[in-house]
Image (spheres, rainbow, N blue to C red):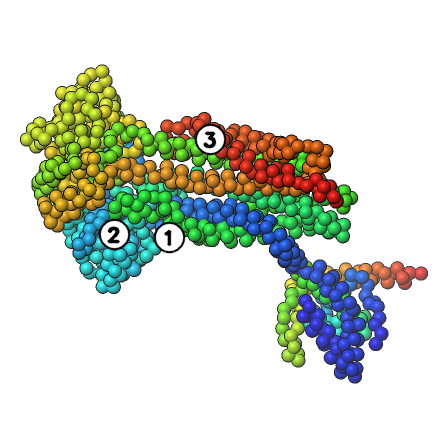
């Protein structure tokens, strides 16, 4: 505008010069002709379309100056908000990166669903290969189906050997995902079928980098996996970690190699062998309900066609964050609670900033009054204050996103990394959605924290406010009531978080101390014979010899073998049962999981035999099959009878029950007691077993001796690192531990913020009532009187906040149900501790300002 | 050159500007000149008051403005009539003729 008017004036001036005036006179005449330049600019400005942004810019500049002038206030406010916004952005980026869009390189994650088999509509499991092929063939609403089943192997290159995890995938895997290998190619359609016909593999970027040192000629080289030479045909791109929430995979092999990787003995062509985990991509525009309806009808047809394998079996698609076969389930609950917690942290932070703004608005009352008196509208004033708030939260949002970026991969830190071969992978992701949510949080926060003080401030009473005044500490003016309410909210929210943290901590401790039913200091060691290509006969000889040698090692009290360690990632055998003298109800099929264990198992692992006997070395192929059942199984199938001597039919073999073992936990401490039984390893030998050793020695000491023995038996073999069972148990409780870690961190933040809030409010109140306090002192009030006077208000607020918080917490902690182990959501100890901590923090926060109040010099206080 | 007070009837400036832009875009000074010329020097626009009016018209969407280079290679902001502005001009012209006819009738009555 200025330029336009300038141009206009220049033209007028030129015209005047052309008419014969001197330049100076011409300019003057032009100005006269034009009128008052500044005035016109002002009038014109009001007419313009962009009047609002102009004002906004003015407010922003003014706001920035105000923030600059009170750096202490600004820094504190920005810090509080950065904490609030940053934690929210971080947790949201985790939810985004782990649950909502876990596979960044996959093109249409919105149309990607987990595929699960169901039994009688409930219990989720896998699918069989023939069922999978029928789904592919008969569906019309799906773009593609893929198989992705987690498998493990031992990789060795040169003299190094380590566990690796990978995916057994359908041949269309990379194509369906839209992931292009960085080097080489993905699988060809024919590579998915034929038994053991196509030993090819795609390796991950990390494997390529770490193991093969970025070898550019890698394609075409081979690597031994489970005794079979696999040709490396491709390297996955760097950002592709597979499609398994929680772990990053090292390799992928086609389903045709299933037998080589799956030690459970499932056959691909067996319709009853449900080992497939996978995903389905819907066609664009198809809803989950429509797709599910189609799957239901296909499953119904399969049930009719193959009643003996498919009775009661269904197929279900689930959103990725509900994927039943990876860590999504655990994470969604943990992150859900964390999101709620950080939202509370944000509210507390907002209350803090609100309080600070209120305090400052008192200091700025003079300015506000002046502006109002000079004719500014209240709306304009409000806009100014909200703009200042927005400025604060914008700076904080930038800081918050930096915090989130920095924390995006922090979740992994909470996980133990001792499971060999599993690379824990919980990446947060900062994409535009996270930014949009952060912006929304930022604006929401501004409205929450800035609007209330702004409305308050703009309602200055003109006549009253121009007089200076000294307010009283205990005076119940509207402003101080509002501030008290804010502190009350803060205290109650932090109490909720404290109580929640207490419950989780207690539950974790209880869980750690709970007896799983076996002794946890037993040492476990595995030698991977399966990957080394041992067949059953060689494995049998190896294990028998190794067991004999280990039993004679110094310090070893007893040793045994089992196929599956308790609390491990491996799957127990499971089979339908026929039971002597038990008539199952119609539609009931008794099934149970079981484990294959060697002699001395119960003595070594410390599970007591209640009646009957333990397995002996003589329970081998030459003697009649036997089994040991647990107490729950005995009570379920032989109620009131003695099961010893009764028989059990498993996989077409009748076994005699020779013992009853005490119940134990088999997978997690959270599981309900269920039927379980044991069969002798020597009657059911498998290639892969792990050694259990009861000893007083340290795992490290045993490890050396063990490595020597293994080496003596086969110089090409080395045992994987030995560890006590306790470590495996700790790993299985990670979701509880993660929840505790996160809630503790954020709970501490909330407590800290609330303490700052309480402290700030108290010190402000004291500083505002210096005169009153001085007067009281001058009139003879003692130090203790003043302390009591000042602190009582803070403590009354705290008490109110705790009471309110307790009521809210009682309602909210019930939502944590699943994460709590043997702890009531209204556990008095957790609430008691929360009360004590809150009180101590409140006492400290109130005492400092109160103590300062007693140091007031009455003479100076009354001077003015 | 003594400056005369604007002779314009209040509220007619907008209409005159729209009229001045009828046959193509002009910048501020050209608009003022054009009005002066069309009125045979009877009407003189106070140069300064032109701009508030122009911004008002722009905000209403009746004219559109853009920077361009003028006859002697100088930068100038050119105003152009929009379709809505054209309609407005017709409406205002009709309205104005009705009023003036009315006033004429009143004044010429005996």
Q: Earlier in the sequence, mark 3 or mark 2?
A: 2
The residue at 10%/31% (across/down) is: A617
Residue that extends furthest to the top in the rendered view of this protein: A640
Same chain assignment for discs 3 and 1: yes
For residue A510, which quarter of the picture? top left
Residue at the disc numbered 1: A104
Secondary structure at numbered mark 3: helix
| Vertical relation: A310 (above or below) A630 | below
Can you say which quadrant of the picture contains the N terminus of chain A? Answer: bottom right
| Position in image of residue A587 (x %, y %) | 26, 26
Residue that extends furthest to the right in the rendered view of this protein: B110
The reply to whether the C-beta atoms of the residues labelled 1 and 2 are less than 8 Å apart is no
Residue at the disc numbered 2: A251
| Position in image of residue B14 (x %, y %) | 74, 63
Frontmost residue, A143 versus A757: A757
Frontmost residue, A145 versus A746: A746
Q: Earlier in the sequence, mark 1 or mark 2?
A: 1
The residue at 49%/33% (across/down) is: A837
The residue at 73%/74% (across/down) is: A9
| Position in image of residue B108 (x %, y %) | 90, 63
Frontmost residue, A435 versus A758: A758
Residue at the disc numbered 3: A833
């Amino acid at each position: 505008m200025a330029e336009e008017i300038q141009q206009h004036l220049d033209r007028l001036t030129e015209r005047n010069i052309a008419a014969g005036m001197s330049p100076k006179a011409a300019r003057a005449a032009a100005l006269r002709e034009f009128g008052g330049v500044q005035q016109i600019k002002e009038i014109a400005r009001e007419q313009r379309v962009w009047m609002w942004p102009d004002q906004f810019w003015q407010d922003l500049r003014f706001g920035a100056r105000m923030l600059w002038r009170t750096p202490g206030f600004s820094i504190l406010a920005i810090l509080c908000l950065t904490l609030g916004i940053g934690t929210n952005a971080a947790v949201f980026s985790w939810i985004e990166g782990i649950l909502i869009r876990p596979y960044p390189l996959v093109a249409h994650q919105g149309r990607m669903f987990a595929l699960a088999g169901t039994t009688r509509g409930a219990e989720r499991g896998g699918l069989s290969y023939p069922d999978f092929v029928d789904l592919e063939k008969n569906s019309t609403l799906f773009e593609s189906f893929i198989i992705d089943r987690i498998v493990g192997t031992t990789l060795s290159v040169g003299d190094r050997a380590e566990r690796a995890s990978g995916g057994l995938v359908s041949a269309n895997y990379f194509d369906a995902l839209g992931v292009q290998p960085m080097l080489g190619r993905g699988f060809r359609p024919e590579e998915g079928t034929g038994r053991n016909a196509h030993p090819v593999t795609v390796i991950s970027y990390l494997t390529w980098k770490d193991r093969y040192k970025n070898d550019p000629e890698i394609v075409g080289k081979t690597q031994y996996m489970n005794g079979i030479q696999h040709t490396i045909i491709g390297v996955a791109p760097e950002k592709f970690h597979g499609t398994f929430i929680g772990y990053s995979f090292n390799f992928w092999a086609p389903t045709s190699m299933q037998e080589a990787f799956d030690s459970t003995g499932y056959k691909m062509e067996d319709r009853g062998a449900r080992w497939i985990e996978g995903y389905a991509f819907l066609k664009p525009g198809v809803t989950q309900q429509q797709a599910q309806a189609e799957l239901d009808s296909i499953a119904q047809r399969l049930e009719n066609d193959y009643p003996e394998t498919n009775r009661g079996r269904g197929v279900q698609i689930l959103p990725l964050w509900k994927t039943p076969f990876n860590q999504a389930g655990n994470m969604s609950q943990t992150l859900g609670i964390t999101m709620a917690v950080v939202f509370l942290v944000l509210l507390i932070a907002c209350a803090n900033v609100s309080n600070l703004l209120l305090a400052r608005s008192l200091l700025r009352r003079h300015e506000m009054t002046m502006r109002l008196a000079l004719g500014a509208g209240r709306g304009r004033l409000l806009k100014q204050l909200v703009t200042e708030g927005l400025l604060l939260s914008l700076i904080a949002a930038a800081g918050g996103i930096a915090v989130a970026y920095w924390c995006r991969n922090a979740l992994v830190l909470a996980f133990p990394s001792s499971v060999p071969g599993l690379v824990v992978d919980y990446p947060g992701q900062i994409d535009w959605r996270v930014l949009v949510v952060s912006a929304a949080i930022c604006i929401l926060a501004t409205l929450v924290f800035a609007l209330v003080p702004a409305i308050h401030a703009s309602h200055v009473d003109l006549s009253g406010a121009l007089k200076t005044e000294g307010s009283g500490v205990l005076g119940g003016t509207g402003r101080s009531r509002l501030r008290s309410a804010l502190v009350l909210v803060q205290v109650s929210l932090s109490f909720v978080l404290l109580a929640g943290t207490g419950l989780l901590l207690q539950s974790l401790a209880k869980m750690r101390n709970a007896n799983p039913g076996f002794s946890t200091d037993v040492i476990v060691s595995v030698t991977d014979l399966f990957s080394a290509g041992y067949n059953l006969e060689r494995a049998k000889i190896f294990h028998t010899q190794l067991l004999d040698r280990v039993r004679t090692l110094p310090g070893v009290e007893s040793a045994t073998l089992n196929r599956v360690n308790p609390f491990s990632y491996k799957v127990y055998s499971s089979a339908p049962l026929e039971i002597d003298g038990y008539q199952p109800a119609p539609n009931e099929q008794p099934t149970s999981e079981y484990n294959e264990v060697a002699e001395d198992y119960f003595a070594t692992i410390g599970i007591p035999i209640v009646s009957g006997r333990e397995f002996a070395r003589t329970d081998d192929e030459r003697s009649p099959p036997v089994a040991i059942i647990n107490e729950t199984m005995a009570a379920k199938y032989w109620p009131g009878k003695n099961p010893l001597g009764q028989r059990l039919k498993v996989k077409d073999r009748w076994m005699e029950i020779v013992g009853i073992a005490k119940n134990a936990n088999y997978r997690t401490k959270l599981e309900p007691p269920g039927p379980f039984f044991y069969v002798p390893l020597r009657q059911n030998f498998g290639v892969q077993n792990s050694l259990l050793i009861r000893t007083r020695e340290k795992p490290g000491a045993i490890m050396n001796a063990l490595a020597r023995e293994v080496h003596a038996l086969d110089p090409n073999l080395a045992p994987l690192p030995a560890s006590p069972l306790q470590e495996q148990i700790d790993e299985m409780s990670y979701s509880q531990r993660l929840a505790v870690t996160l809630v503790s961190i954020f709970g501490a933040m909330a407590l800290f913020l609330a303490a700052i809030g309480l402290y700030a409010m108290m010190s402000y109140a004291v500083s505002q009532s210096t005169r009153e306090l001085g007067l009281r002192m001058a009139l003879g009030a003692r130090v203790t009187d003043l302390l009591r006077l000042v602190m009582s208000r803070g403590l009354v607020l705290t008490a109110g906040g705790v009471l309110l918080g307790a009521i809210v917490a009682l309602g909210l902690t019930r939502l944590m149900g699943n994460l709590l182990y043997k702890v009531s959501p209204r556990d008095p100890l957790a609430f008691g501790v929360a009360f004590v901590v809150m009180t101590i923090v409140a006492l400290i926060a109130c005492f400092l300002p109160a103590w300062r109040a007693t140091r007031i010099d009455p003479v100076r206080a009354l001077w003015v | 050159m003594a400056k005369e007070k604007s002779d314009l009837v209040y509220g007619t400036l907008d209409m005159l500007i729209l009229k001045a832009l009828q046959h193509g875009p002009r910048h501020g000074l050209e608009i003022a000149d054009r009005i002066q010329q069309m009125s045979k020097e009877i009407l003189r626009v106070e140069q300064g008051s032109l701009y508030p009016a122009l911004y008002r018209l722009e905000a209403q969407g009746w004219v559109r403005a853009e920077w361009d280079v003028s006859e002697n290679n100088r930068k100038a902001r050119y105003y152009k009539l929009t379709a809505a502005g054209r309609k407005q001009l017709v409406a205002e012209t009709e309205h104005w003729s009705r009023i003036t006819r009315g006033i004429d009738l009143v004044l010429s009555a005996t």
